[in-house]
Amino acid sequence: MKKIAILGSTGSIGTQTVDILPSIDAEVVALTTNRRIDLLEEQARALYPKMVCAFDEAAARDLKVKLADTGIRVLSGMDGLTACAAESGADIVVTAVVGMVGLLPTLAAIDAGKDIALANKETLVCAGELVMRAAREKGVKILPVDSEHSAIFQCAQAAHGNPLAKIILTASGGPFFGKTAAEMRSVTREQALAHPNWSMGAKITIDSATMMNKGLELIEAMWLYDMPPEDIEIVIHRESIVHSAVEFADGAMLAQLGLPDMRLPIQYALTYPARVPCKVPRLSLAEAAKLTFYAPDYEAFPALNLARQAAAQKGDRGAVLNGANEAAVGLFLEGRIGFAEIAERVAYALDAIAYRSSVTLDEVLEADRAAREIVLA
Ligand code: NAD
Ligand code: MG
């Protein structure tokens, strides 16, 4: 029986992970939230983990009272999150927290020899080189949960040692597909939060609207598959049925298809290399009937170019791009800046912070801090 720690168990990916647990042979050893303690309590009473963490200190105090009769250890803050990742006795850690807050616990889990089911893409965007190197050194697997990266992972299993010549990353295009930059200036928070195909946390939903999500995924794919960014093509595919594709030297292209439902990639990351029945509804190609593909509009969605450039430069650019984006999306969600200003502030931070071509962990944390400070100023 696999022992699983779920970081961010109260979020969109976290709750869907809990949902598929009955399909797999697993025991949950740790659960974490930021401050949704009612849901965390419910999950803890159902799954009986060894330890839980509420990142927020006040929430952790309340949770401790709620769980007093259970004997479950209640932790808080970054130490608590890291303990849940590295000291809960997990075989595999699902990283489903949002944002670069996932970086230190992920590194701690790798250091402790845990495999990672990685949803928290911000970690790879900030520090892909450090994370992938640590994973190689410790011999741990980084199993992708992000649907596109899971698709690439599944297709790559047909490679039999042959290198991938190209990755084709599909993108739904989000709620503002087909709009010009001028038309997007006046869009509201509610319009940006209305994703056509996926129901997700607020931050990634805004990233999908700006298409920064696809930019972050480009960087995520570059690190996961050691692929030069110029060999990663982004294609708009409105139906979100083809989750991504790979191409080989002979031009053969393989793709993975399915209905847009995160529970399949989550489950596969946890059962790999086995495949077991999944509760996700089956795709009918006849019902899907038509699949469409378009080139992305790099002019209307400047976040794509910012991410492409950061991917090409590497060094500290991923940390600056991500930190600035997290801060700018936060401001947009609070109604303090307009939609177009998200990418503008990210571009400004990338300009303002001097480029470093290689980074230590401390320098990644510093680049992240500096980027946030500039965006919030
Ligand atoms: P979400 O907002 O629904 O959930 C985030 C989780 O992280 C919650 O449990 C929350 O309590 C916790 N959290 C938030 N801030 C925290 C903090 N400061 N410290 C500790 N914990 C904190 O987000 P989500 O949509 O589930 O996304 C999680 C991650 O998965 C993101 O990195 C996202 O990019 C990635 N992802 C999500 C989807 C999706 O369909 N939702 C798909 C692919 C990748
Ligand atoms: Mg994705």
Image (cartoon, grey):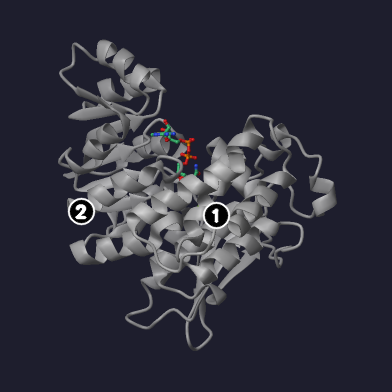
The residue carrying mark 2 has its beta carbon less than 8 Å from ligand 1: no
x and y, in percent, of residue 356 in the image: 46, 65
Closest to the observer: 251 or 323? 323
Tell me which numbered mark, 1 or 2, is placed earlier along the sequence.
Answer: 2
Q: Quadrant of residue 326?
A: top right
Q: Are marks 1 and 2 in contact (CB under 8 Å)?
A: no
Please name the residue that numbered disc 2 is placed on.
111
Residue located at (31% from left, 38% from top): 6
Closest to the observer: 363 or 95? 363
Classify the position of ligand 1 by quadrant: top left, top right, bottom left or bottom right.
top left
Q: Residues within 10 Å of mark 2 (few under 14, many from 20)?
A: some
Quick one: SS at disc 2? helix
Closest to the observer: 321 or 44? 321
Quick one: SS at disc 1? helix
What amino acid type should be assigned to the residue bearing mark 2? Asp
What amino acid type should be assigned to the residue bearing mark 1? Leu
Left or right: residue 306 compared with residue 251: right
Residue located at (45% from left, 69% from top): 357
x and y, in percent, of residue 252 in the image: 51, 82
Q: Residues within 10 Å of mark 1 (few under 14, many from 20)?
A: many
Residue located at (40% from left, 72% from top): 226
Q: Where is the N terminus found, in terms of image quarters?
A: top left
x and y, in percent, of residue 321 in the image: 55, 54
Please name the residue that numbered disc 1 is placed on.
321
Residue 199 appears anywhere in the view: no
